[in-house]
Image (cartoon, helix red, strand yellow):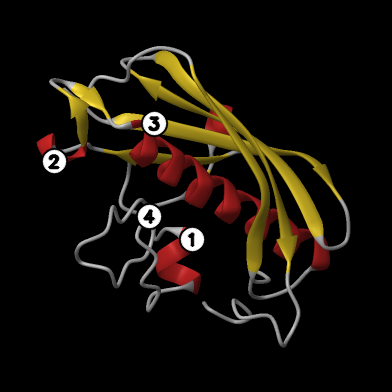
């Protein structure tokens, strides 16, 4: 994956989110990038697990998988809504519904790849489908819905 600026770095450089916050030195610091080439229309990420992310020897923890997929899918939704609105910044979006399917053990012996795309959307809502791949095999999928929040919501303008 090249070193282009991620959506998080561009729009939320001070974010402390455990999954994707660039400012959280103890977090996962996953980086979501707008897809190019064969992946146009998707948002992609590559992230390398460490031994501390294991559920058991050599296998990525399911909670870490869920965190990666939630954050990555949220950025996919926010980016989509920003483009749909013709805005300069993404709206603050929060998870409304989230379901992960763990299909097989995800090994930690190399990077994992996330790929997500919006499958339904409205003015303030986007539903995203995502997959996590390890060694070229899909090991987990998710479907999640995100909602853009307004001023007064505790998460409003968090980025």
Give the distance between the C-alpha atoms of the residues marked 1 and 4, in whole angstroms.
Answer: 13 Å
Placement of the N terminus among the 4 image quadrants = top left
Q: Quadrant of residue 58?
A: top left
Q: Earlier in the sequence, mark 1 or mark 3?
A: 1
Identify the element where label 4 is drawn: loop
x and y percent of residue 50 in the render? 15, 38
Q: Which mark is residue 19?
A: 4
Give the distance between the C-alpha atoms of the residues marked 3 and 4, in whole angstroms.
Answer: 15 Å
Residue at 29% over, 32% down: 61
Residue at 49% over, 60% down: 7
**Which label sits in the foreground, 1 or 2?**
2
Q: Which mark is residue 69?
A: none
Identify the element where label 3 is drawn: strand
Q: Earlier in the sequence, mark 3 or mark 4?
A: 4
Q: Where is 80 relative to 21, above or below?
A: above
- Mark 3 highlights which residue? 113
**Which label sits in the foreground, 3 or 4?**
4
Q: Judge by depth and name the residue closer to the eye, 154 or 44.
A: 154
Identify the element where label 1 is drawn: helix
Give the distance between the C-alpha atoms of the residues marked 1 and 2, in whole angstroms.
Answer: 26 Å
Is any atom of residue 57 visible in this view? yes
Q: Earlier in the sequence, mark 2 or mark 3?
A: 2
Q: Earlier in the sequence, mark 1 or mark 2?
A: 1
Q: Earlier in the sequence, mark 4 or mark 2?
A: 4
Give the distance between the C-alpha atoms of the residues marked 1 and 3, in whole angstroms.
Answer: 16 Å
- Mark 1 highlights which residue? 7
- Mark 2 highlights which residue? 52
* Disc 2 crowd, CA 10 A, few/some/many (<14, 14-19, 20+): few
Q: Earlier in the sequence, mark 1 or mark 4?
A: 1
């Amino acid at each position: 994956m090249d070193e282009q600026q991620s959506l998080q770095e561009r729009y939320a450089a001070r974010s402390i989110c455990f999954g994707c916050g660039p400012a959280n030195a103890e977090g996962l610091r996953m980086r979501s990038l707008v897809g190019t080439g064969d992946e146009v229309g998707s948002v992609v990420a590559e992230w390398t697990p460490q031994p501390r992310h294991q559920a058991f020897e050599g296998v990525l923890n399911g909670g870490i998988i869920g965190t990666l997929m939630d954050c990555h899918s949220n950025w996919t939704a926010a980016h989509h809504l920003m483009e749909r609105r013709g805005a300069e910044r993404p709206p603050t979006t929060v998870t409304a519904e989230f379901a992960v399917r763990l299909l097989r053990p995800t090994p930690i012996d190399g990077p994992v790849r996330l790929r997500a795309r919006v499958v339904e959307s409205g003015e303030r809502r986007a539903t995203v489908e995502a997959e996590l791949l390890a060694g070229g095999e899909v090991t987990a999928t998710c479907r999640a819905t995100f909602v853009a929040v307004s001023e007064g919501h505790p998460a409003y303008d968090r980025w």
